[in-house]
Image (cartoon, grey):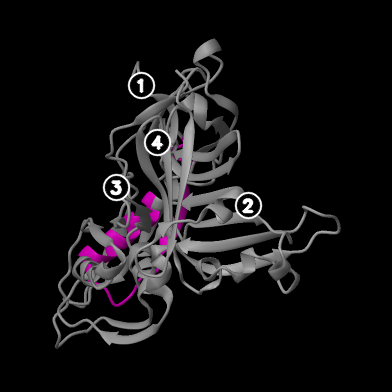
Amino acid sequence: MPNLLGIHLTLLLGKTVPVPAPPDLLESLQEVKVTYNDQGVSGFEITFKVGRSSPLDLIDFGVLRNPLLLAPLNRVVLLVTFGVVPQVLMDGFITHQQLSPGSSPGTSTLTVIGEDASVMMDQEDNSTEHPAQNEMIIALKIIASYAQHGLAPLVIPPLSVDFPVPVERIPVQQCTDYAYLQQMARRYGYVFFVTPGPVPLTSTAYWGPPPYFSFPQKALSVNMGAETNVEQINFSSNARAPVVLEGQVQDRLTNQAMPVRTVASTRVPLTAAPAWLVQQPNVRRRQFRGSGLNVAQAFSRAQGEMDASVDATVTATGELDALRYGGLLKPQALVGLRGAGFRHDGVWYVKSVSHTVKIGSYKQHFELSREGWGSLTPVVPV
């Protein structure tokens, strides 16, 4: 049912502790765009109308004299209230500004662009050793060092946990903290991302497999009359996406050549007919070429590569009306889909969501993914 109380957007700006934006900025606010991805940086764009309405504006546009918008890395918090419950839409930092003077009155705009809190982890290259620490411990340590920006770690250990013995090897970081977290995640088919909330001025830094273990969000409804909240949706499948890994590794501990082979995906199943299983024996095969690893490490990395390959075998892209949906469609989580037929109904992983907010309009463009076809459940939460 649509939210009869409407949707309200709150904008907070500031250097350390953001405060509500002044009325003149809110009056010139034209559009807000927020994009979330399950891999890489999420960001926002806030567009303001600019013009000249006072003598001071003859020197420069009034909006351009506001330090809240022009100070580098000023913090921005966007809250969306559906009815009476506020939710954090974005918590990030300003990185760019774009001024577009118009050729006629009322057409000039200033666009403020920024990224989520992970941008603070990408500011400085580090040459750091991490003796006797595996990837899970390193991830926890790095994320915890950004607690002043409201980041809280959520780290899931890999299938194989290998504590490096300092006399054998010492993990060395030669890049920014953000790049190193992404680099470690890719070894196991993991993802690293930052999501805002659950309360303002806090964010969760997730390092682990795509979070398929969450409870599905309110269902996306297609072709269901008055219950429909999806305005358009398209499905696509890629038969070449799944791969299995085969090969061998010279065990670093025993110096023996040992076979490495993946057989099945270890992701939590979302479908009745996973493509990697349906397409046997025609699934693509790739050679595992890792070196300098023990058997457990080699298997974990081969398994991670296979798991990552099946994640987006089947995808869906579409757009929904936030007012009819009655809430935020959250990325990096599960959602139910109904009304598209057995082959495409069921539970999906929300890979990315783009929000576009204007006066009188709130659209959410989404991308869903999963490993195959067919629903595992007769009903989904609504």
- Looking at the rendered structure, the secondary structure element under dot 3 is loop
Q: Amino acid at mark 4?
A: Leu
Q: CA distance from mark 2 to mark 4?
A: 54 Å
- Label pair 2/4, CB-CB below 8 angstroms: no
- Label pair 1/2, CB-CB below 8 angstroms: no
- In front: mark 3 or mark 1? 3
* Earlier-in-chain disc, 3 versus 1: 3
Which residue is disc 1 drawn over? 380
Which residue is disc 4 drawn over? 277
Position above or below: 244 against 113? above
Q: CA distance from mark 4 to mark 3?
A: 37 Å
Which residue is disc 3 drawn over? 198
Would residue 48 be found to the left or right of residue 208 on screen? right
Which residue is disc 2 drawn over? 28
Residue 236 in sight: no
* Earlier-in-chain disc, 1 versus 2: 2
- Looking at the rendered structure, the secondary structure element under dot 2 is helix
Q: Where are the magenta residues, as a range?
A: 279-307
* Earlier-in-chain disc, 4 versus 3: 3
Residue 319: percent from the left, percent from the top? 58, 34
Q: Which residue is drawn at the image coordinates 44% and 34% (left, top)?
A: 372
Position above or below: 216 against 89? above
